[in-house]
Amino acid sequence: MYDEAVQTYNWTSTSPELGATYYACPGDTVTLPWSLVTTSSETVNDVEWYFAEGGGNNTLIASYIQGELLLSHSERQHLAFVPNAGLKVSDIAPEDFGQYSVRLVINSNSSFATKGGYVFVRLPEPPAVSDRLLRARILPSAVQESGQWHVQLSCGRFNSRGSLKFSVRWKTPSGQVLNSTYSETREDILTLPNPVEEGNYSCFLDVQDPTAKCAFVSPTMMTSSNLHINSCSVQQALFNPVQQEKEEMESAFKFLIRVRDTVRLVNGNRPWKGRVEVKYNRTWGAVCDTDFSALSAAVVCGMLGLSGQVLPLAIEAYTWTSRSPTNNTVYYSCVGDAVTLSWSFTLTSVESVSDIEWYFTGTGGNTTLIASYIQGELLLSHSAPQPLTFVSNAGLRVSNIRPDDFGQYSVRVVINRNSSFATETGYVYVRAPDPPTVADRMLHVRMLPSAVRRESGDWHVQLACGNVTSRGSLNVSVKWRTPSGLTLGSSFTENGEEILNVSPAEEGNYSCFLDIDDSTARCVDISPAMLVSNEVHVDTCSVKPPLSNLVQREKREMESVFQYLARQHDTIRLVNGSRPWNGRVEVKYNGSWAVVCDDLFSVWSATVVCTMLGVTGQVIVSYTIIDLATTSSACAV
């Protein structure tokens, strides 16, 4: 009898799997190496092979009975038996492509069973892409390996890799041929070493398959077009992952902030003003940290739902009126000009000015009385500059200045308050004007290495003009000429340089120049090289490094703020882990520990958790779904 129900298959390891495909060209030979393991009590009674072309019906093509191969009358004489159940198909013709199957009858102690298998013999298939063009591209984000960021190139976008055995190889700008770093389903990836070699890269197919002779591969599929890599494209690839990390950090930060009522402003006259306090061990305390920066304050405001500019408070008070010069004020003048020293004193109803005296100290250091104002009359010293004029109520006007009149002028006011006398003094300088100077007597313009971010969240590239060692005395403004010819004023002054915020950046050449609006400029010698700067070229490539530096700095500052706040709270832990550095994430909320359930809990969120716990290294995140989603982190060290 025959037992048609076979529960297990005992094919040898060299036998093809069910549905395996053999690729061949017309005229080739294919061996289908079916082989069955039998015991001492089992024998193969007979073997039958069938063929089905293009999904049609099975047709018996050969049998092996009692040691003899019997061919069907419809078959060409190109089949051979391969022990102990295999078949060799020689000189394949186009009509021989299709499905081949085998059926064995096994005798086991006069009980018969059948075993079967099938494979396909097909023409080789070339790799394919949608537009029949092999393309190379730079991946938008770099990857981090061994602590360094690496740019990656991709080749392929295969719709199908086909059947041919091939590898994707790369040609570098210097002509070196490299293997792909690894392969994915649709693309082969090359990780570039640092520093990146700039120039043209291309990828090509290195086909090592004998059946390629009958598989048509379009020439445009064999070699890609050139991909140009330069510092600009590298900067963009390096910037994107940093930006993504920063965004993920912000997401993780906001997630943790949502479960804490831990920061407040106190003793302020408005809800958005006051001293910063944080809650630690359920007790409020003031923040005392020299690293608490403007960004730290902005984070606190964000936690409180406030937005806008963060400003310090300042209080100033003066004895003299607001139009009086402060001590050390310098008045700049050309020879022949007039200067008014506008001292003025505030008096109450019980006060009066008893007398006023003015003194002059020249370059030699000697101080002499030059004028007095007593009982409404101006009295001049015989050595005083001519002419001098009184200016109410304690000022002095010096006209037709001579070179000898440059020096220090001081005033002494005697005030009578109910017959009690007090004195107030002040001093200023009158000097010849000074031109601005730079180290090499040339006005320079440059792009600052880091961009800045506005309150709206947009970023600015910044240009700096000057590198000034001394700004001099002239009333000078720095103006900017844009690529389109517009004239702009500087955004602000910092460290001897005039800064221009540019966003979005108009591409082209920028320059700066001195716009002098000062009558004393006529007696100052200014080098022509100080009037107009060189040009700096701004384009999409040159703005990448400043933007990348901005994001890196914000990320570092956010990490500092985040770690500072994390140190103040015992609010996160890992539980039910086999090691101190793995387990389920829980946070403390309203004094109770609770599981973190959040679809947005990413690898970066887990990295933040590990950092808060003082653990560093690779982070692995797993998700377990029970009645609710629980998140497990492993901080692998």
Image (spheres, grey):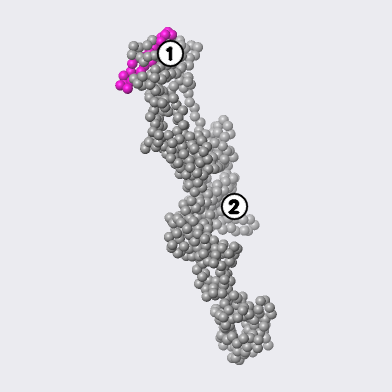
- Can residue 67 be seen in the rendering of this structure? yes
Q: Position of residue 375 (x, y in %)?
A: 42, 8
Query: Range of the magenta residues?
Result: 358-378
Tag 2: Cα neighbours inside 10 Å, few (<14), some, or many (≥20)?
Answer: few
Q: Quadrant of the N terminus?
A: bottom right
Taking 134 as reference, is 539 above or below it?
Answer: above
User: Where does residue 269 sit, x and y in percent of width and height?
Assistant: 57, 30
- Position in image of residue 218 (x %, y %): 56, 67
**Residue 308 forms part of the magenta stretch:** no
For the question of whether residue 280 can be seen, the reply is no
In reply to whether residue 359 is colored magenta, the answer given is yes
Q: Residue at x 57, y 80 (%)?
A: 27
Q: Are marks 2 and 1 in contact (CB under 8 Å)?
A: no
Q: Which residue carries the number 1 mark?
A: 390
Label 1: state its secondary structure. strand
Q: Residue at x 62, y 80 (%)?
A: 96
For badge 2, the amino acid type reads Leu
Q: CA distance from mark 2 to mark 1?
A: 76 Å
- In which image quadrant can residue 339 be found? top left
Q: Look at the numbered disc 2 and give the secondary structure of its residue.
A: loop
Q: Give above or below for 587 relative to 423.
A: below
Q: Residues within 10 Å of mark 1 (few under 14, many from 20)?
A: many
